[in-house]
Amino acid sequence: MAITTKKLLLINPVSRSAQGLACDPSSSFMPLGLGIIAALTPEHWEIAFIDESFEEFAFRPADLVGITAFTANAPRAYEIAAVFRAQGIYTVMGGIHASMVPAEAAQYFDTVITGEAEVVWPLFLSDFNDGNPATLYEGGVVPVEKIPHPRRDIFRYPYVNDLIQTSRGCPMGCDFCSVTLMCGKKYRERDVEDVLDELEETTRPLLFIIDDHLVNNTRYARERALKLFKGMVGRGIKKLWLGQASINFADDDEVLYWAAKSGCTLILLGIEGETTQALRDVNKRLNLKRGVDSYREAFRKIHRHGIAILGAMIFGMESDGRQELLNRRDFILRSGIDAIQASIMTPLPGTGLFERMTAQNRIVLNNFPDDWQHYHFMQATMGTAKLSRDELQAIMDEVWLSMYNKENLRRMLFRTLHRTRNLKAAYWVYGANHNYGRMTLQQKIHNQPGGITRNMEWNSGKRSLYLRFTDYLLTLLYAVSWNSMVEKFRGQY
């Protein structure tokens, strides 16, 4: 008997109030989890995909609708699900937010899947085909051998980056992070040859390796990292890539050498804070153990291999007052960090931070689920022991303006070029800083006096002599070295 074709519609929603990384096509990342869902779906299902980073959702017929969402996008996911449920179309939600608050998600979706989907998605589809799907499936943590290569053909939008995950899990247990709750306390590493096979399936010029700790702190981490990086070189996988790591990424010069040789151009380091007290606030144990005095030497070693540093820093920790926030800004600008991810401490559901702040009645924006739209790390949802929520927000606007204004971004560009001697790294840093500026200062990007343009320049007033002078330098660099590289970064070939 012939199997009837059914239609599965997968959707990646984006908040209407804050676009986040969707602020620019170069920072709009494909939802890799939906590619894995597509790979786990039998061939008799016809699969369509909508990413609101590029295309606003519009209703289309389907037999089943699957939606994933980060916390800030959850209210939008609920809006979209309501449209389909009103038409009698079955909806299912998975991802980090649904995994942290399944009872809430169940109010808006017919089925909720928590944890990792590799085992339970086929089970859910079987139950759905039989007409008796459950309302909740708990995926838990799965063996990495069960992780398929994602269906990359569904990612039809002009993403600049391909994404790949070589491992799951994190034992760090940072107070503000839900990764350990979602993916477990143990590093689960995929077979390197299988990772290399998947890398050969990617087509885009830039690569984001989304492991939380690319070079972890286990006994054999060094050997695995070298096998991966040397394998990329040996197979001729020519990518410029960004990864995420802890400060221990700088420990081994051979690892750094092969990382750079394999295309590592930018590395995101979870610095979080520059003082012992700040690190204690977030339970950042690895950085505490090494000490804040170790940062600059680590940065220097990474730069020496031509790799730029994207420093992840948190503002609004419990011990933060105005001066602490300004000190953190000044540390960033002096430290050797090249690209700045400066976020506000946000109590994500499921984390120890959320539970503690809820118990103390400290969270101000707590009208859930509507207020989840503000949980994008660029809006204060609570205060600190020294600052109200409004005071924290006002100081952060000041901090962001002082870091992400055009003149400072231009200075950081040339500092990166001096530190790394790498034009590609400098260009990537310049673009990343512009995008983070657009994210954090979204409300100030307008055409009225006192606003700033999307290019991070003031709408009124003369351009500084420094900007006018460096315009000529950038024009020369563009003509001599950057022209073809820019087109490649934009995914033109």
Image (spheres, rainbow, N blue to C red):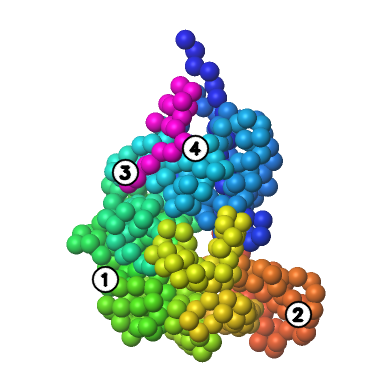
Residue in the image at 49% along x and 69% along y = 361
Foreground tag (1 vs 2) = 2
Q: Check disc 1 and report the residue beneath it.
A: 252
The relative height of residue 425 versus residue 34 in the rendered view (above or below) is below
> Pointer 3 and pointer 4: residues touching (CB < 8 Å)?
no
Q: Nearer the viewer, residue 97 or 223?
A: 97
Q: Earlier in the sequence, mark 4 or mark 1?
A: 4
Q: Which residue is outermost to the left?
A: 219
**Magenta span:** 123-141
Find numbered disc 2 in the image and state the secondary structure of the residue it sits on. Answer: loop
Left or right, 179 with respect to 369, comes to left
Residue at label 4? 111
Distance Cα–Cα, label 3 vs label 4: 20 Å
Neighbour tally class for label 2: few under 14, some 14-19, many 20 plus, Cα within 10 Å:
few
Q: Is 157 left or right of 277, judged from the image as shown?
A: right
- Observer-side mark, 2 or 4, equals 4
Q: Earlier in the sequence, mark 1 or mark 3?
A: 3
Q: Residue, x 50% and y 71% (percent of image)?
A: 362
Check whether the beta carbons of the residues at disc 1 and disc 3 lie within 8 A of each other.
no
Name the residue type under label 3: Val
- Residue labelled with disc 2: 450
Q: Is residue 257 magenta?
A: no
Q: Position of residue 406 (x, y in %)?
A: 64, 78
